[in-house]
Image: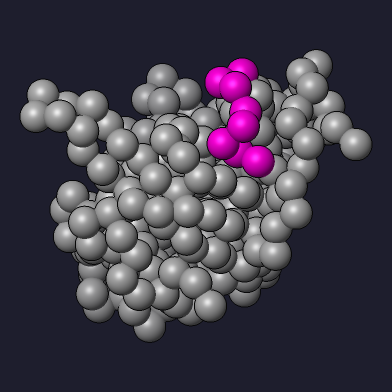
Amino acid sequence: METQLAGQVMVKPMQADHLIELRRVTKTYNVVAGKFMALNEVDIYADAGEFVAVVGKSGSGKSTLINMITGIDTPTSGEVLVASAAVHEMDQEQLAVWRGRNVGIVFQFFQLLPTLTVAENIILPMDFCNTFPVNERRGRAISLLEKVGIAEQADKLPADLSGGQQQRAAIARALANDPPLIVADEPTGNLDSATSDAVMQLFANLAAEGKTVLMVTHERDLTQYFTRSIALADGVVVSGGSK
């Protein structure tokens, strides 16, 4: 049975044993020197309720891996399954709708829109995906801000918040449409250690509630929060990828 999504006929769901499953994923880029293989037949998985770190040196393939999982980029070959959706088979319009409903992304530099209040930033994904009735969206935004501990900042602009508060707001925005997957790219890179610990605890709590949290990080003193680490080197998984 095909799945209908925002007026578009989606590809047929595929059977997957895990919330995230990459099967023999390869990504090759054409560069001046020829072809560059960013990922080489990568197999990884992640289950609901896992808090998974993706680690490796610069150029190891971490960002490319995250881009495969979120549908920001497509594999040269292989399969990318997230919540049984065949992400690698979707076109750009389908990907945008799918991503809005299924993936919450948290960036290192927050990426909050500066001219919108904190609450308006959180309402925006709900407006885009039409996931909640209009008259319930602000209430949900306030509830999410309460969850991350900054409800009193709801009507301020992002510039009026500290870095830690902005990252909490970004986490609340990632949760706006209640996605099963949260992807975080170096979310503590610009935070002091105490604020980093508080933000990491927020992510750990989300995993405990059943979300899958996938985080790219260089921080070695945060391992206590993760349930598992996936290590990459030269586009290949060297540990933690598959059972």
108 lies above or below 30: below
127 lies above or below 88: above
How far across and down, in percent of the image, does residue 96 sit? 59, 26
The residue at the far left in this view is 33
Which residue shows up at 41% across the image and 74% down it? 240
How far across and down, in percent of the image, does residue 242 sit? 49, 72
User: Which secondary structure dominates the residues rendered in magenta?
Assistant: helix
The residue at the far right in this view is 1
Residues 239 and 154: in front is 239
Which residue shows up at 75% across the image and 28% down it? 10
Report which quarter residue 128 is drawn in: top right
Which residue shows up at 53% across the image and 54% down it? 22
If the image is split into quadrants, where does the N terminus sit? top right
Left/right placement of residue 209 relative to residue 74 reads right
Would you say residue 119 is visible in this rendering? Answer: no
Left/right placement of residue 109 relative to residue 135 reads left
How far across and down, in percent of the image, does residue 109 sit? 29, 41
Report which quarter residue 104 is drawn in: top right
Q: How many numbered callouts?
A: 0
Residues 188 and 44: in front is 44
Left/right placement of residue 7 relative to residue 51 reads right
Would you say residue 87 is visible in this rendering? Answer: yes
105 lies above or below 193: above
Which residue shows up at 35% across the image and 75% down it? 239
How far across and down, in percent of the image, does residue 125 sit? 61, 30
Left/right placement of residue 55 relative to residue 42 reads left
Task: Look at the image and say whether residue 89 sits in the magenta stretch.
Answer: yes
Residues 36 and 52: in front is 36
Task: Look at the image and say whether residue 149 sits in the magenta stretch.
Answer: no
**Colour pattern:** one colour
Extent of the magenta region: 86-93
